[in-house]
Image (spheres, rainbow, N blue to C red):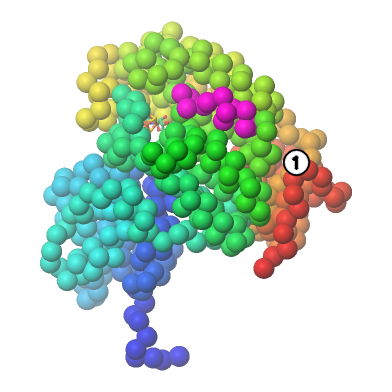
Amino acid sequence: MTNAQAPLLKRLFIETHGCQMNVYDSERMRDVLAPLGYAPVDAPDDADLVILNTCHIREKATDKVYSELGRLRAHKERRAEAGVKTTVVVAGCVAQAEGEELMRRAPVVDLVVGPQAYHKLPELIARTARATGERLAADFTPEEKFDALPAPKAEGVTAFLSVQEGCDKFCTFCVVPYTRGAEYSRPLARILDEARALADQGVREITLLGQNVNAWHGDAGAGEGTFAHLVRALARIDGLARIRYTTSHPVEMTDDLVALHGDEEKLMPFLHLPVQSGSSRILKAMNRKHTAEDYVAIVERLRVARPDIALSTDFIVGFPGETERDFEATLDLVRTIGFASAYSFKYSRRPGTPAAGMHGQVSEEVSAERLQRLQALLGEQQRAFNAAQIGKTLPVLVASAGRRPGQMHGRSPYLQSVHFDGAPALVGQIVDVRIEASTQNSISGTLSLRPREGEKVARSAG
Ligand code: 5AD
Ligand code: SF4
């Protein structure tokens, strides 16, 4: 079809670094730019608009942005020689933290836009296109941002739903309270509307997102209740079969939320609950507001409520002042709890955070050696957790076709990747899979034909 009036299609490439919140934000950016004629492509080579959605949490993540921008410069120059323009946007937390610096250090960047200003992207892009006007996005409140962004479009049977943003916890190592701003909870009605819309589009599992998701309190002053209320309200939506949430803070694991893990069958038995260290002394210096003993007690309460709950966590090794004894306490905590999975990082000194100025910075060698020991133990636990599923029959939400023809891919209640042979028509259904094999990162088995009891049967498509 040739049509001179058809809007010119432009190509958009978004590269996402960092957390689930960035993954979510990238999807929203794709949605707001679609009306301007931007269609997503899988590689930057032919893109008219390249957005780097960045992460500032560790130094390595910020370095990556600058090396990526070097590559983009070559790409932009090549295209300019051929007479085509490329617009380069830096979004996300590096944009928020280093906007001015970025524009100065990397002239390849046309526009810098922080996480609160994504709803203004179309306007900003339009302004840049005219090569006039302001180049830095102003600060917008999260309320404005959420109100102006289109509701999420579902692309599969699982989806993220942002319910909370920002953080007031001020852990001494962390940039999030500065890059993502103050804690903000979205109003209950908005979240429920979005969840219903997702369910209508065939989504069966939602993951509630927020930097401090379990601190959710709804509309301030409207008495919308606690995070447990929110989960209960979402669980009443037909079609939604599974609910997860991430990331939680231990001090917000209230009794009602712990109890809900035992009462609400749609709430999946998996929890990502960052602990950061097993040493109470270090936790205090981190301003985590809980001790190692508190954390163990929370996990015990969770296991009373839901005995099979699988735990995941985050660790930082080499925080200023961490001694071998403190680190041993971290290893002890790992042995005491037994994690199904975990992320662990070397402490990264972030300018502007209190820990950056603390005495007793730990050397790179010591941190690297500790990280290796910790990861060896965590890897062992992850393999053991996956191997422990062998012989069990698990309800698996079928998400997509697998790599091999005839193979399907899904998720266990414990957020494990599951492979099995089955028909593509199963996508969206919860099926029983008898687990027969495992690796560190996934489990696999055979579809069980016995009809399932318990979890509700999938609605017919359409
Ligand atoms: N250095 C290392 N790890 C960090 N994290 C946050 N800030 C830092 C830092 N300065 C880790 C924490 C957090 C996860 C998202 O990133 O473990 O839970
Ligand atoms: Fe950062 Fe701590 Fe807030 Fe998590 S709770 S986002 S680690 S300040």
User: In the image shown, does 444 or 218 lie closer to the viewer?
Assistant: 218
**Left or right placement of residue 308 versus residue 138 in this view:** right
Q: Where is mark 1, residue-wise?
A: 394
- Res 269 seen here: yes
Q: Is residue 269 above or below residue 82?
A: above
Give coordinates of residue 308: x percent, y percent. 69, 29
Residue at point 15%, 68% (across, down): 131
Whether residue 148 is in magenta: the answer is no
Label 1 sits on a secondary structure element that is: strand
The picture quadrant where one finds residue 402 is bottom right
Residue at point 51%, 12% (across, down): 293
Label 1 Cα neighbours within 10 Å, binned few <14 / some 14-19 / many ≥20:
many
Magenta residues span 250-261
- Quadrant in which the C terminus is drawn: bottom right
Q: Ligand 1 near label 1 (Cβ, under 8 Å)?
A: no
The residue sitting at the front extreme is 222
Residue at point 32%, 27% (across, down): 170
Whether residue 251 is in magenta: the answer is yes
Give coordinates of residue 313: x percent, y percent. 51, 29
Dividing the image into four quarters, tell me where ligand 2 lies.
top left
- SS assignment for the magenta stretch, majority: helix
- Quadrant in which the N terminus is drawn: bottom left
